[in-house]
Image (cartoon, rainbow, N blue to C red):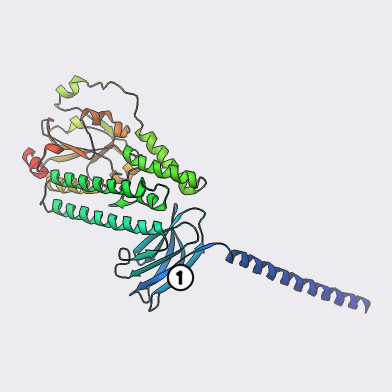
Amino acid sequence: MARVGYGCGRQIINNIITEHEKSFFVALVVIALSACNSEPKFKVEGEVSGADGKMLYLEAAALEGIVPLDSVKLKGDGSFSFKQTRPESPEFYRLRVDDKVINFSVDSTETVGVKAPYADFATAYTVEGSANSIKIKELTLKQVQLQSKVNELIKKMQAHQIGADVFDEELSVLMKDYKDEVKTKYIFAAPNTAAAYFALFQKLNNYLIFDPLNNKDDIKCFAAVATSLNNFYPHADRSKNLYNIVIKGMKNTRTPQQKVLELPEEAISETGIIDISLRDMKGNTHKLSELKGKVVLLDFTIYQSAVSAPHNFLLNDLYTKYKDQGLVIYQISLDADEHFWKTTADNLPWTCVRDANGIYSNIAAMYNVKSVPSLFLINRNSELSARGETIKDLDAAVKALL
């Protein structure tokens, strides 16, 4: 009996301990949840009209990519409200319905108010409570307008309403005006803001408008923002990443020690052109002089430039039209990023080679290339016929040589 009694007593004690443990565990959970709920948060709220039944997503636009945070199914009035833990330094977020996106930034614990119609969600929205987000909207609208103008220019070129000279000139003016305005009003005016950072990474035709690896003037913009962010948020990942981009860009564009260009006379006298010998992405060597008997369009370009895509549209039209009649394209990439060059060149149907010296290419210097893209026409006798800025109608000029 004693043993039985002792056993029952031990079981009772164990039950008491178990209940105490459970209570203690529950208390810990409550404390943890309370601590979590007490963390400083930011809030984004508003309305999306005409979107009944649509899913609205809140996403972080992080360095590693888009990260889903929360979502809600919109009802008749389209109202929504999201809360998230505040970022340690300014960060970027976006609201998304289908493939329509609104970008905004958060500095701390602010409440960002957004109202938008579903039909023009990405452009007709209003935003309150965040000065940087208001600037980001301005930049977004400017980029949309720029893309629209460039698309219209491409259509005119493809319809042969304008020639190559007009196309390149107008495209150059559009890009310069846009970059000058953004530099003045958004980057150098307040380089320590999220809006300035956002401006650096805007794209045209899916290419960066400001080129941090190949353009010395653009690198200055990145450097201004990197310096400011580093002063305010030295430990932030974005600050470190931007600093690394600037260092790489400065290294790529650092003026090398001046060397005397050695230009063998036979390279010109035998062929009538300055010969070029460079490798393609597979390591095969291509010599310009070996194309004698063909009409050659020699092109210097930087694929990472925002003007590269429309320029290649122009070349593709010509190549498709005249390749069977003897036109070949010999395109030289001056890109600093070898991987980017290989990825892009892999999709092009003509000869694509790269000069690893980039914008300090001796070959480009010998051809007196001042800017890119820059093209030259070479006739069937391997004689330089014309260069881009002197050609009024590229199509007619190519056809005449064929």
- Indicate whether 287 appears above or below 345: above
Q: How many other residues sit within 10 Å of disc 1, few (<14), some (14-19) or many (≥20)? A: some
Residue that appears at 19% across and 23% down:
267
Residue that appears at 8% across and 38% down:
401
**Which quadrant does the C terminus fall into?**
top left
Residue 280 horizontal/vertical position (percent): 29, 37
Mark 1 — residue?
81
Residue 319 horizontal/vertical position (percent): 16, 45
Residue that appears at 36% across and 45% down:
188
Say what amino acid the circle numbered 1 marks.
Answer: Ser
The front one of 316 and 70 is 70
Indicate left or right for 268 with 341 as reference.
left
Residue that appears at 93% across and 77% down:
2
Residue 298 horizontal/vertical position (percent): 19, 36
Which element carries disc 1, helix, strand or loop? strand
Residue 76 horizontal/vertical position (percent): 38, 79
Q: Is residue 400 visible?
A: yes
- Indicate whether 41 appears above or below 255: below
**Which quadrant does the N terminus fall into?**
bottom right
